[in-house]
Image (cartoon, rainbow, N blue to C red):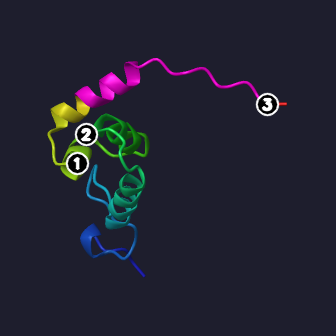
Amino acid sequence: MARSKNPATDDTDWRRPGGATIGDRIAAFAMLDGMGSASQAQKCLRLALVGFTNAEIAEMLQTTPAVVGQNLYTERKKPRAAPKAARK
């Protein structure tokens, strides 16, 4: 069976260019719900790590892409704690 030239009608895992599927969005909202009282910056970082663009993150968190960019910059510049030594 030949593939259609219109990706919107294909039954495959269709994505807009740079876009997320509905399954991606559902998984993202479930992840955000599980993050509880995490800061907006922490949520931005988690969503960026799984591949969402700043515009997509801004849409999900009801903010602007510029705010998302600033949140990502701030979170990435925070010093990280060294891993704890293994307990004996």
> Which image quadrant: the N terminus?
bottom left
Residue 51 placement (x, y as % from top left): 39, 45
Amino acid carrying label 2: it is Asn
Of pointers 1 and 3, the one earlier in the residue sequence:
1
Residue 21 placement (x, y as % from top left): 33, 62
From the viewer's perspective, tell me whether residue 71 is left or right of residue 23: left
In the figure, 10 relative to 44: above or below? below
Which residues are drawn in magenta? 70-87
Q: Which residue is mark 2?
A: 54
Q: Secondary structure at mark 3?
A: loop
Q: Which residue is mark 3?
A: 87
Answer yes or no: do the residues labelled 3 and 2 have beta carbons within 8 Å? no
| Residue at point 32%, 60% (across, down) | 25
Q: Which residue is mark 1?
A: 61
Amino acid carrying label 1: it is Leu
The Cα atoms of the two marked residues, 2 and 1, are separated by 10 Å
